Amino acid sequence: MVTQICEGVRRKTAKEGREVALAFPPLNYGGHPYHHIGMAGTVIMPEDVVRETIIYTLLGLWDDGFRKIILVNNHGHKWMLEAGIQEFFKRFNLPAMVSLVEWHRAVREFFYPTDRPDSMTTHFVHADEAETSVGLLLFPEMIDMSVCVDAQPKSLALKGHFDTSVDSYSRPHTWSEAEGQNAIERFGTPEGIVGYPSRGEARKAKRPIAAILEYLKLMIDETLEAFPVGKVPEPSEFTFYSKEEIEPCLREPLSEGWKSVHELKKIGIFNK
């Protein structure tokens, strides 16, 4: 999903003469919550693998001159990506702008059920009407509706306290804040589905996809307005490196006087 969304943004910015750079996928496989354990077709990376992959992807991109980075994520393992961003800055102390966008949550209103004919009829959960609709729009050749089944989660306790994937109910808790209140998917929903994918239609995904494309474009526009190409947050306001230390690293890679971040002395209590 996110590669197709990012490609749409690239095409739009290319037409405007300032094409964004795409670097994906930084994660071929991701982290998962505990309740995905044991599900067929699920490849689960340890949390530190996910976090460290993000950290060193950011570092490599920064050293190559990319200092304004938006990580676009599907729903899931969000806490690992946030931790990766925070640790990147703590560990390397570099002036940059890095944002995480969990794209479904960013445009959650466009997934809410309404009385529109092109609306979802259920709230976004997992492998459901919403995700199937997006798949049918972005990569229909990968969706086989002839084997589609519907399924619902098995609640064990605290039903109604935890929100679904895009927090559309504004409940007190996000889905990732706990375990034990529902049966894990291997036993509760062995189908791998939580919702009604049988209701999926490509037309239902057009508005949320258009919305996320516009939102990402807005983020890019406002970022470049604040920090044009070649500019970063003022080092004296963002890093503990002196201007003299960091300035060579901010030059175009391989240009005269440029230095790699690997030539910087390590500073800070988190840089071991």
Image (spheres, rainbow, N blue to C red):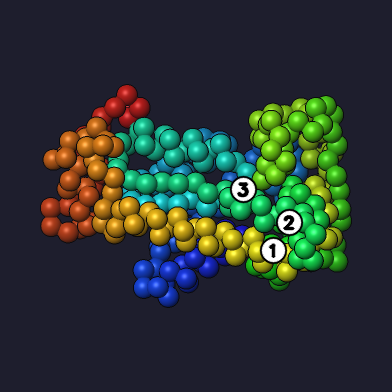
Q: Mark 2 points at which residue?
A: 130
Q: Name the residue under label 1.
A: 205
Q: How far is mark 1 from mark 2, CA to CA?
A: 7 Å
Q: In this view, does 64 lie to the left or right of 87?
A: left
Circle 2 sits in a helix, a strand or a loop, which is it?
A: helix
At 36% from the left edge and 32% from the top edge, which residue is drawn? 90
Quadrant into which the C terminus falls: top left
Quarter of the figure with residue 113: bottom right
- Mark 3: give few (<14), some (14-19) or many (20+) Cα within 10 Å: some
Is tag 1's residue or tag 3's residue first in the polypeptide sequence? Answer: 3
Q: Is residue 182 left or right of residue 28?
A: right
**Residue 155, image x, y percentages:** 84, 33
**Residue 166, image x, y percentages:** 66, 45
Is tag 1's residue or tag 2's residue first in the polypeptide sequence? Answer: 2
Q: Which of 45 and 54 is in front in this view?
A: 54
Q: Name the residue under label 3.
A: 105
Q: How far is mark 3 from mark 2, CA to CA?
A: 12 Å
Quarter of the figure with residue 163: top right
- Mark 1: give few (<14), some (14-19) or many (20+) Cα within 10 Å: many
Is tag 3's residue or tag 2's residue first in the polypeptide sequence? Answer: 3
- Look at the numbered discs 1 and 2 and tell me whether their residues touch, using CB distance below 8 Å: yes
